[in-house]
C-alpha cells in the first residue's frame, strides 16, 4: 500500500511522512531529497543548473541510493549536506527540468515496488502515485512555514529572507510544466499552520485503514 503526501516546503510533510513510516513500519521515500542529492552532485561537479543538457546527463549517470531515511551518492552518505540555503535555492530550478523529473520518478517507482511505502513531495498524489490508497495534501501559511524553517536553525537567512525564499520556491513549484504542486481532486487536505506534529499525525492516522 502507498500513502502519498504532497505539500509546499515547510508544511510539515517530511516530519509526518517519516513518523508515519516509522509507526507503520513502511518504507519512507522523500522525493525532495533525491532532487536535492542531484543538485548537490551537480554543484560539486561545477555543473551550471541552468544548463539542462548537462544536468540531465549527470542525473542519468548518478549512482544514487536511498537507505532507510538516508541518501547516498556513490556510496557516500550525503543526507546531512542536503538542507543548506544553496541546495534549497538550486534544487527548485533543477526539479523543473522535465527529464530530471522522469529519472527521479522512475527511481521512486523502483524503490516503492512491492513495498508498503510512505512517499512525499510535490507530485506524489498527482503524477507519481495518482492511484495511491491514501493521498494527503498538507498546507500551511507562508509565515508559519518560514518560522518552522527558521527554528530549525540550519539557515543563515533572516526570518523575512526565509519567507521570501519560500514564496519564490512556491512560485516555481506551482508553475512547473510537469509535476507542479497542486491540490489534486480527491486528496485529503489539511492546514497544519496551527497544529502540532502529534495533532497532524493523529488526524492522518485516523483516516488510514
Ligand atoms: O521537499 P523539498 O523542499 O526537500 O524539495 C526540494 C526541491 O525539490 C523543491 O524545490 C521542490 C522539489 N521537488 C519537486 O519538484 N518534486 C517533488 N516530488 C519533491 C520535491
Image (cartoon, rainbow, N blue to C red):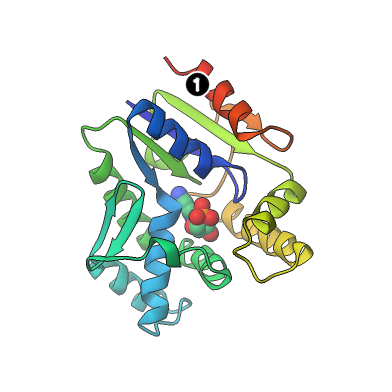
Look at 73% across and 63% down and name the residue there: 164
Left/right placement of residue 37 relative to residue 85 reads left
Question: Please, what secondary structure does the residue beneath circle 1 have?
Answer: helix
x and y percent of residue 197 in the render? Answer: 60, 34
Q: Is residue 186 visible?
A: no
x and y percent of residue 161 in the render? Answer: 74, 67
Q: Quadrant of residue 64?
A: bottom left
x and y percent of residue 70 in the render? Answer: 34, 54
Left/right placement of residue 104 relative to residue 134 reads left
Q: Quadrant of residue 99?
A: bottom left
Left/right placement of residue 18 relative to residue 2 reads right
In the image, 81 versus 189, the foreground residue is 81
Number of marks in picture: 1
Q: Residue furthest bottom?
A: 46
Q: Quadrant of the N terminus?
A: top left
x and y percent of residue 121 in the render? Answer: 48, 46
Look at 51% across and 63% down and name the residue there: 83
Look at 54% across and 68% down and name the residue there: 84
Label 1 neighbour load within 10 Å: few <14, some 14-19, many 20+: few
Is the residue at mark 1 in contact range of ligand 1, meaning its CB lies under 8 Å from it? no
Q: Which residue is mark 1?
A: 205
Amino acid at each position: 500500500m502507498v500513502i502519498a503526501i504532497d505539500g509546499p516546503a515547510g508544511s510539515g510533510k517530511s516530519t509526518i511522512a517519516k513518523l508515519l513510516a516509522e509507526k507503520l513500519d513502511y518504507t519512507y521515500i522523500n522525493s525532495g531529497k533525491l532532487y536535492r542529492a542531484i543538485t548537490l552532485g551537480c554543484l560539486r561537479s561545477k555543473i551550471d543548473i541552468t544548463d539542462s543538457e548537462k544536468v540531465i546527463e549527470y542525473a542519468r549517470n548518478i549512482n544514487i541510493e536511498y537507505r532507510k531515511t538516508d541518501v547516498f551518492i556513490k556510496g557516500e552518505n550525503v543526507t546531512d549536506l542536503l538542507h543548506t540555503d544553496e541546495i534549497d535555492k538550486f534544487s527548485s530550478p533543477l526539479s523543473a527540468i522535465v527529464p530530471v523529473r522522469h529519472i527521479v520518478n522512475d527511481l521512486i517507482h523502483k524503490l516503492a515496488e512491492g513495498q508498503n511505502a510512505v512517499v512525499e513531495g510535490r507530485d506524489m498524489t498527482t503524477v507519481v502515485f495518482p492511484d495511491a490508497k491514501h493521498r494527503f495534501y498538507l498546507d500551511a501559511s507562508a509565515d508559519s512555514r518560514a518560522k518552522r524553517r527558521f527554528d530549525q536553525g540550519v539557515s543563515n537567512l533572516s526570518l523575512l529572507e526565509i519567507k521570501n525564499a519560500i514564496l519564490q520556491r512556491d512560485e516555481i513549484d506551482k508553475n512547473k510544466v510537469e509535476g507542479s504542486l497542486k491540490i489534486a481532486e480527491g486528496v485529503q487536505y489539511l492546514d497544519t499552520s496551527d497544529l502540532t506534529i502529534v495533532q497532524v499525525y493523529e488526524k492522518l492516522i485516523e483516516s488510514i485503514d
